[in-house]
Image (tube, rainbow, N blue to C red):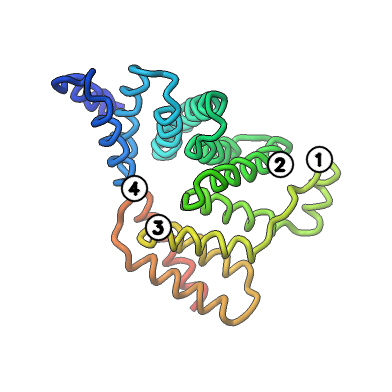
Amino acid sequence: MKKIFLVLFVVLSLPGFSQNYRGVYEKALSLKKEYKYVESLAMFQVLLKTDSNNVDYLGHASTMFTKAGNMQSDEKKRFDYYRQGEYLAKKAIKIDPNNAEAHYAYSLVVGRLSEQASSKQKVANAKLIKSEADACIRLQPNHAGAYHILGRWHRTVAGFGIIEKMAINALYGGVPEGGSYDEAVKCFKKAIQLEPAYVLHYYELAVTLHERDASAADKTDAVAALKKAMSLQNQTPDDPATKKKCEVLLTDLQ
């Protein structure tokens, strides 16, 4: 949080700031692409102070609230970030239903909020996550983050056992329609195609292949994905932890 206020102070002190919103916006996007979530969030917060109804500011700020929130060790603070991200995403969609980043941001934050949700709410959230990620891809077909979310969605639904499906159908309004390991693999491969240096895509692909386990090729491909992930340069704050997960899964597979 101290870092946020420091960046806010620096940005507000920039000469001609009030006439240079575009430059600040481009810098905020650049920081986002560099996975500097806290710094990017600070700039988007500044931009929202200049125009609280700008859909681009709202959508990206929501995504950064969720990403920065996931870095918080304190659970209350983490979910405060998520709730703020949810508010901004919903506001952006209300203003402009055709903004791809807003739909992605909403699908992302709903997934995080599900961590504290009841079982019934998780089922409702699963349907919402799918519809929002689909909306993002319909509007921006090359959005890697949305494909990643859909990959996880398909894997989760595909992994439900018969008893779990019966319980969900009986108690919570039914299992979300669709969901297959094949679609999950396609989604993660598409995400990798769009972001070939992103470690987490490879790890999630490997997990999916391991769970599907439809052929000997799945194991071979999973091992290859894990080794590729471990060979990549760290970029995001989560990459070191993700690579440790890769090591654990690789040990299980070999």
Q: Earlier in the sequence, mark 3 or mark 1?
A: 1
Q: Earlier in the sequence, mark 3 or mark 2?
A: 2
> Horizontal placement of 164 versus 60: left or right?
right
> Horizontal placement of 45 versus 103: left or right?
left
The residue identified by callout 4 is 237
Q: Amino acid at mark 1?
A: Gly
Label placed on residue 123: 2
Q: Contact, CB < 8 Å: mark 4 with mark 3? A: no
Q: Contact, CB < 8 Å: mark 1 with mark 2? A: yes
Q: Amino acid at mark 3?
A: Glu
Badge 2: residue crowd in 10 Å (few <14, some 14–19, many ≥20): some
Q: Amino acid at mark 2?
A: Val
> Horizontal placement of 162 versus 7: left or right?
right
Residue that protrudes farthest toward the left in the picture: 15
Tell me how far mark 4 sits from mark 1, CA to CA.
37 Å
- Residue 36, percent across and down? 30, 41
Residue 70 drawn above or below residue 179: above
> Horizontal placement of 177 versus 52: left or right?
right
The quadrant where residue 21 appears: top left
* Residue drawn at (47%, 49%) of the image: 143
- Residue 49, percent across and down? 35, 17
